[in-house]
C-alpha cells in the first residue's frame, strides 16, 4: 500500500507500536527450558490484552500466533513443545491486525552469549537488513535493497535465502512489491513515496536451499547450518526512510 492520508499513517504507526511492544515481551520471555509453544501462548494472551488479532493465525490454515524458528529452521517454524537451551538462536516472526491494518516483523535472539560463528551470523543478518533499509528512498529500485542484503551476507561468508522474500504490507499481509534478498543495483520496480514495505531476509550459515520439515511448515537448511532472520516495516520517503518497527537499539542476546 501507499500511505495517502494522515489518518492512515496514524493507524499504521499505532499498530506497529503495539506489535513492537508485544514482540519485545516475547523476546524477554526467551530463556533456557521454556518452549516455543509457551511463547506462542504468551503471544495469544498479549494479543487479547491489546484487543488485536495475530496476523498469521488462520493464514492457509496456520493455527499459531507466531512463527518461532530455532537454529537450522530458517523461517515458518511451528512453535513446538521442545525446551530451548543455552546457545540456541531463536527467531520470532510476528504481526498483528489492528483496525484493518497488518504488521509483520521479526527478530533473532541468542540464549546467552553466542559462540564466535553465531555472533558473526547475527551481526551479518542484522546489518544485511539495516543496510537495505537505508536504500528505501524514493527513486531507488527493489534491486538496490536486495543487493545490500546479499552483499552483506556474502562479505561474511554466508548466504541469503532466495526462496523467501520481503513484501509490501497494508490491508493484507503480503502486498506488492516483492522484495527479494538478492538483486542488482538499479534493477527492478521503482520505490515510491509512502510505500509501506517489509524488508527482511534469512541469512544462513549454509547454501541457499531449504527443505520442508515433517510438520509441513518449518523450512530447514539442507546441511543443518544455523539461520537468523530480521525484518523491519518501513515507509519509503524522499530523503530518509521512516522505520515503523524501530528496533535498532534491541539486543540480540537474552
Image (tube, grey):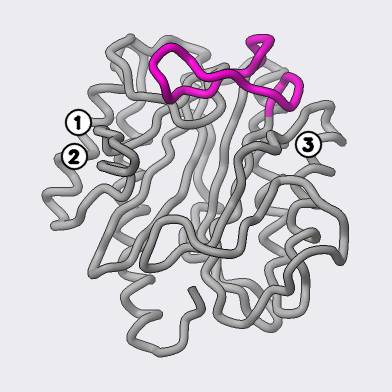
Using residue 31 as the reference point, say whether residue 40 is left or right of it.
Answer: left
The span shown in magenta is 204-225
Residue 34, above or below 121: above
- The circle drawn on residue 239 is none
Using residue 36 as the reference point, say whether residue 124 is left or right of it.
Answer: right
Alpha-carbon distance for marks 1 and 2? Answer: 5 Å
Q: Which of pointers 3 and 1 lies earlier in the amino acid sequence?
A: 1
Alpha-carbon distance for marks 3 and 2? Answer: 34 Å
- State which quadrant residue 25 falls in: top left
Q: Are marks 1 and 2 in contact (CB under 8 Å)?
A: yes
Relative depth, front residue between 127 and 79: 79
Residue 220 is one of the magenta-drawn residues:
yes
Residue 165 is one of the magenta-drawn residues:
no
Expressed as whole percent of the image width and height from the top left, the position of residue 217 reads: 43, 25
Relative depth, front residue between 242 and 141: 141
Q: Provide the secondary structure element on which disc 1 rests.
A: helix
Expressed as whole percent of the image width and height from the top left, the position of residue 157 reads: 84, 26
Q: Which residue is mark 1?
A: 41
User: Which residue sits at x=38%, y=13%?
Assistant: 84
User: Which residue sits at x=57%, y=17%?
Assistant: 72
Alpha-carbon distance for marks 3 and 1? Answer: 33 Å
Q: Which residue is mark 3?
A: 153
Residue 96, above or below 196: above
Q: Provide the secondary structure element on which disc 2 rests.
A: helix
Q: Which of pointers 3 and 2 lies earlier in the amino acid sequence?
A: 2
Q: Which residue is mark 2?
A: 44
Q: Quadrant of the C terminus?
A: top left
Amino acid at each position: 500500500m501507499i500511505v495517502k492520508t494522515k489518518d492512515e499513517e496514524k493507524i499504521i504507526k499505532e499498530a506497529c507500536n503495539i506489535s513492537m511492544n508485544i514482540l519485545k515481551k516475547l523476546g524477554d520471555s526467551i530463556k533456557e527450558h521454556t518452549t516455543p509453544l509457551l511463547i506462542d501462548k504468551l503471544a495469544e494472551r498479549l494479543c487479547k490484552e491489546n484487543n488485536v488479532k495475530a496476523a498469521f493465525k488462520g493464514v492457509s490454515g496456520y493455527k499459531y500466533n507466531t512463527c518461532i524458528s530455532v537454529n537450522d529452521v530458517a523461517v515458518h517454524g511451528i512453535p513446538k513443545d521442545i525446551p530451548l537451551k543455552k546457545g540456541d538462536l531463536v527467531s520470532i516472526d510476528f504481526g498483528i491486525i489492528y483496525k484493518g491494518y497488518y504488521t509483520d516483523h521479526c527478530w533473532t535472539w541468542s540464549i546467552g552469549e553466542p559462540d564466535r560463528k553465531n555472533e558473526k551470523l547475527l551481526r551479518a543478518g542484522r546489518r544485511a537488513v539495516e543496510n537495505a533499509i537505508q536504500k528505501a528512498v524514493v527513486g531507488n529500485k527493489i534491486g538496490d535493497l536486495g543487493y545490500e542484503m546479499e552483499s552483506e551476507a556474502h562479505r561474511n561468508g554466508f548466504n541469503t535465502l532466495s526462496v523467501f522474500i520481503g513484501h509490501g504490507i497494508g490491508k493484507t499481509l503480503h502486498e506488492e512489491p516483492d522484495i527479494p534478498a538478492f538483486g542488482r543495483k538499479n534493477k527492478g520496480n521503482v520505490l515510491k513515496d509512502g510505500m509501506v514495505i517489509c524488508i527482511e531476509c534469512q541469512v544462513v550459515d549454509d547454501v541457499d536451499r531449504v527443505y520442508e520439515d515433517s510438520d509441513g511448515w518449518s523450512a530447514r537448511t539442507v546441511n543443518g547450518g544455523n539461520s537468523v532472520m530480521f525484518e523491519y516495516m518501513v515507509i519509503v520517503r524522499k530523503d530518509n526512510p521512516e522505520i515503523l518497527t524501530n528496533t535498532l537499539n534491541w539486543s540480540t542476546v537474552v
